[in-house]
Image (cartoon, helix red, strand yellow):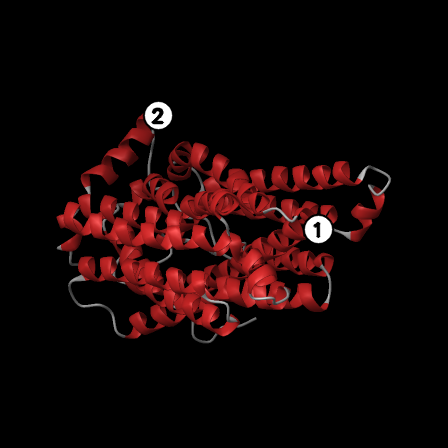
Amino acid sequence: MTLRKPIINTEFTWFIIARFLFIAGLRMTPVLLGWKLYEVTGSKLSLGILGLSEVIPAVLLALPAGVWVDKSNKHRLISFCMAGYFLLMAALLVITSNWFASEINTLEKSTARTLTETLIYGLVFFTGVIRAFSSPAINAFMAQLVTQEQLVKAISINSMTWLIAAVTGPAAAGLLLGYTSITVSFSITCIAILAGLALFQLIKPKPISWNAGKTKTWDGVKEGLHFVIKQKALLSAISLDMFAVLFGGAVALLPVFAKDILHTGPQGLGWLMAATYLGNFVAIAGLTSRPLKNKQGKTLLYMVAGFGLCILVFAVSKNFWLSFAALFISGLFDGVSVIIRGTIVQLFVPDEMRGRVSAVNSIFVNSSNELGQFESGVAASIMGTVPSVIFGGSMTLLITIYTWFKAPSLRKFEY
């Protein structure tokens, strides 16, 4: 295959295509497992446990993983991570298949259900182990593919690619689940990840930026934490995002909304899952052509507040299209904050620190999605589905107001 017009350079182009396939495959999984678990168990709490299964290892291993990333061959590490994800998706394909269900149908119904749940949680746990390494490794490796002058453009393209994949994956999963089967859906997931792994091999390994010498892992961890703590605007930005997503994320309960409140099938669930990311993409596409010029800190706070308001609208909606619109607009607000936050992280972090700082960032930002999923499942079990989402949206607004007054360095931040 010949690419006539590379995106920045040829290797970055291969990176973008490989990442798209990889992320699209991974983002199919929450739709497939969320629908399967809620169908099998009827339990909102099971959806929360699903998120917790992934986030526990991702958080516990994130900081030492960041040190490992900085002192490792990132190309080899990412390749191993992609291969690991492929094997785990293949295992989930088997466990969720009709063949597996028929094999355990001799067991008591409750025993079979518990066995299926346990195996799913166990495999998702190991995806969290891999994610602790893959997320900082991919972020650090991307910065090695472009020059410093190209970095801002590369960040936007990378974010847009992730978001296109995040829209494509859930939408495709919903359609495949509605018109074919979960086995076919997971087969497509495996093919996408394997194709991404193959294309990634077209990129040459890059030099290791940090010579750790005799530095112990814990000393490296402390260096990463100390760097983030010193950068007040960076710390405030990622803290704000963590709490906003922790309380404001309604994604975990989308299977409940789709099935019990909006009365739509898996196709509707797929589009609801994709709505936020579609809004993200539109916002980031606009900012790529017309970047923010000033007052980025204030803009970030406004965007998070708008996100919280959209979650409140979604909570009370009983119409599919209004719910879709609320999630889409929340994605517009979130997309602007993604660019601001991502630029802060990449521009102010030296190459030799990228793995460790990305690991700290992943604890604050990425893992908040799964912690939010668990919080949503628990809150919905206690309060009910709609009140729990109203509570989450309200908390997001209160956290934004608190940050406005308590984090002046972020409010005044410009780049």
Q: Which mark is residue 93?
A: 1
Q: Give the x, y percent position of residue 20.
A: 51, 62
Q: In the image shown, does 268 or 317 lie closer to the viewer?
A: 317
Q: Give the x, y percent position of residue 28.
A: 58, 58
Residue at 74% x, 48% y: name it.
94
Q: Give the x, y percent position of residue 405.
A: 15, 49
**Quadrant of residue 222 in the image?**
top left
Quarter the C terminus occupies = bottom left
Q: Is residue 325 above or below residue 43?
A: below
Check disc 1 and give the amino acid type.
Answer: Leu
Is residue 266 visible to the viewer in this orientation of the structure?
yes
Comparing labels 2 and 1, the label whose residue is closer to the camera = 1
Q: Secondary structure at mark 1?
A: helix
Q: Residue furthest right?
A: 106
Question: Seen in the image, is 58 located left or right of residue 248?
Answer: right
Total numbered labels placed on residues in the image: 2
Question: Seen in the image, is 28 located left or right of residue 241?
Answer: right
Residue on which the image places disc 2: 218
Circles 2 and 1 in contact, beta carbons < 8 Å? no
Q: Which mark is residue 64?
A: none
Q: Secondary structure at mark 2?
A: helix
Residue at 19% x, 48% y: name it.
233
Mark 1 crowdedness (10 Å alpha carbons): few <14, some 14-19, many ≥20: many
